[in-house]
Structures are given as C-alpha cells and as structure tokens.
Image (spheres, rainbow, N blue to C red):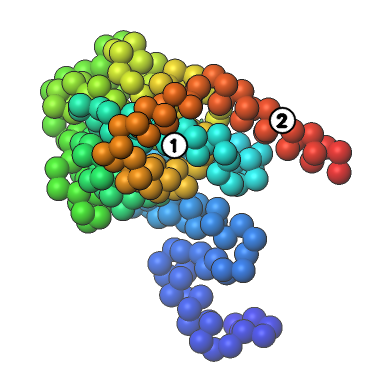
C-alpha cells in the first residue's frame, strides 16, 4: 500500500528497514540523537549482547538527561577534565565495558584506551560467555587488540561469584578504573578495594556517582569524546594535570548538577 505522498522509492526503503527490523529516523526529528541511541541499543538487544535490563537502565538515564536539557554541563566538562588527568596519572588504568557501552560508543572506547594507554576489560552484571564474546568482537571490529574479561582469574571481594569476576591483569590490579553505566554494588565494591573510579552516570544521586573519585554526570556518548579531547590536551603537561584535579570537587560538582536539574524542573512546572 502506498501511503499518501509516499514515493515508490520510499516504500522500498521502508520495506528494507522493516526486513532489517530497524526504524527510519528522520534527521529533522527534534530528538534525533536520542532516538539513534535507542536504535543502537535495540540493535544490540536483537544481537543478544544488550540485556533487557540494560534497555531499562538507559531509560532511567534518559530521564536525567532530559532534566539537563540533553546537553553537557559546565560541571560535566570540569569532571571530564579531572577524569582525563586521573587517567594520565594512573599506573594501571582500566576501562570497564558492558553491553550498553559496547552498543553506544565502541569506537570511542577503543580510541580512549589508545590515548590514555588503558586496558579494556569487559565486566557484565548478567554474565554469559556468549555476551562476552559478542562484545569482544564489537570492540575488536572497532580496532581493539587486547580485550580482557573472557577468562577471569580473580574476583572483586564483596560481590557474588558471577558479578565479581574480573582479571588479575586488568581490574583486579588496576589503580584507576573508568566505569561507565556501572551498577551501584560493583562501584561500591571497587571503591572498597581502594580503586580510584571514574563514573559516567547521568544520575547524580546514584551510589555509583557518590562513590566515585570522579563522577561525570553526562550521557556516555558525549562524555567519552570529551575525555579523549582532554587527555590529548593534558598529555605531557603535569602543571595542567594538577590544576585539572585541584579544580574538581566531587561533592560540590554533584550538588551543582542536582541544583541545575531541580531548577530546570521548576521552570517546567512554572510553564
Ligand atoms: P545505584 O548506583 O543508585 O544503586 P543502580 O545500580 O540501580 O543505581 P543501574 O540502573 O544499574 O544503577 O545503572 C545504570 C545507571 O547508568 C543509571 O543511574 C542511569 O542513570 C545511568 N545511565 C544509563 N544510560 C546512560 C547513558 N547512556 N549515559 C550515562 N548514564 C547512563
């Protein structure tokens, strides 16, 4: 059936998209970026490496992003610069990757691991070998060569056996761990191990944000490129690295973001 105003070519496109189970998103859509992220997650879900719980967690993140106007705040920029400084100062930095992160920004994760000289380790809440292999393949397709996580030989104290699995070479002996979209339990357990964690979490009230050495409250696909830019900018400049860290105060930063979210909400209520 031809829809009103629909040319023959667009029917073909529509059919192809349906065959591939994808949704056509017009560039002009006001929520284009947000819808593209959803599509990437749905694709990951269909391919089996994003779990349904991951889709729900993304929805929670979207709600907080809405309150930020879906923009990177000044506070997030300060936190990303501090994160870059911490990565540059680290002796054994590791980036922890889960299904959502692999679906949303694999290329950027690999690039960050290169510029920050950090290892990549896959760490999953709902762990299966099949999911780990699929995520490893995505990272390798995006240029990663040495992804950890498939063969764990250590465990994070305080977590149940499956969720605590990690590698001795990677997270277990890391001094700084970047934990985008991490669950609160694991973030707390890593903090107890005296790891310096860098959280990327849109919820400024989460245990993950409150336990991190540096908490970046921003959408992960905006954050990782921001950290890359800062690593490139700070590299070899110890004075600026020091300054980036001294300029950042986690609790002050989180309070400022919560205040910003509350103010935006009040403005909506006044309309
Ligand atoms: P808590 O830390 O309070 O115990 P939790 O363990 O329930 O929270 P999860 O829902 O497992 O947290 O973690 C997902 C977190 O990641 C949520 O707080 C959500 O706001 C955040 N999040 C989801 N998608 C994104 C995204 N694309 N970018 C940044 N943060 C995101």
Number of marks drawn: 2
Give the Cα distance between marks 1 and 2. Answer: 22 Å
Crowd class of label 1 (few under 14; some 14 to 19; many from 20; radius 10 Å) = many
Q: Tell me where residue 193 appears, x and y as whole percent.
A: 29, 12
> Which residue is at 31% across, 53% downward?
107
The residue at label 1 has a CB less than 8 Å from ligand 1: no
Q: Tell me where residue 103 appears, x and y as whole percent.
A: 37, 49
The C terminus sits in image quarter: top right
Give the vertical position of 73 relative to 14 (above or below). Answer: above
Q: Residue furthest bottom?
A: 8
At numbered mark 1, what does the secondary structure look like: helix, strand or loop?
Answer: helix
- Which of discs 1 and 2 lies nearer the camera? The answer is 1
Q: Residue furthest right?
A: 270
Front one among 175 and 5: 175
At numbered mark 2, what does the secondary structure look like: helix, strand or loop?
Answer: helix
Give the vertical position of 269 relative to 189 (above or below). Answer: below
Say which residue label 2 marks: 262
Q: Tell me where residue 108 appears, x and y as whole percent.
A: 33, 50
Front one among 241 and 157: 241
Q: Tell me where residue 106 appears, x and y as whole percent.
A: 32, 50
Q: Residue 187 occupies which quadrant of the picture?
A: top left
Front one among 39 and 92: 92
Residue 80: give its label. Answer: 1
Q: Residue 167 occupies which quadrant of the picture?
A: top left
């Amino acid at each position: 059936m031809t829809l009103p105003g629909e040319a023959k070519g667009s029917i073909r496109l529509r059919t192809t998209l349906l065959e591939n189970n994808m949704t056509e998103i017009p560039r002009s859509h006001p929520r284009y970026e947000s819808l593209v992220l959803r599509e990437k997650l749905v694709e990951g879900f269909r391919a089996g490496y994003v779990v349904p719980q991951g889709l729900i967690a993304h929805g929670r993140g979207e709600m907080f992003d809405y309150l930020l106007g879906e923009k990177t705040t000044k506070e997030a920029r300060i936190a990303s610069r501090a994160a870059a400084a911490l990565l540059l100062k680290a002796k054994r930095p590791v980036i922890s990757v889960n299904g959502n992160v692999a679906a949303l920004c694999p290329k950027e994760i690999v690039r960050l691991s290169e510029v920050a000289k950090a290892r990549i380790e896959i760490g999953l809440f709902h762990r299966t070998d099949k999911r780990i292999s699929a995520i490893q393949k995505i990272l390798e397709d995006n240029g990663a060569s040495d992804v950890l996580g498939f063969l764990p030989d250590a465990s994070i104290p305080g977590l149940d056996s499956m969720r605590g699995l990690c590698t001795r070479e990677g997270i277990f002996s890391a001094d700084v761990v970047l934990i985008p979209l991490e669950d609160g339990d694991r973030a707390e357990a890593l903090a107890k191990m005296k790891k310096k964690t860098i959280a990327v979490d849109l919820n400024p009230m989460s245990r993950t944000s409150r336990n991190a050495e540096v908490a970046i409250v921003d959408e992960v696909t905006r954050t990782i490129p921001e950290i890359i830019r800062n690593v490139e900018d700070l590299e070899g400049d110890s004075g600026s690295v020091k300054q980036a860290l001294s300029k950042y105060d986690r609790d002050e930063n989180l309070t400022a973001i919560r205040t910003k979210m509350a103010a935006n909400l009040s403005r909506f209520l006044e309309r």
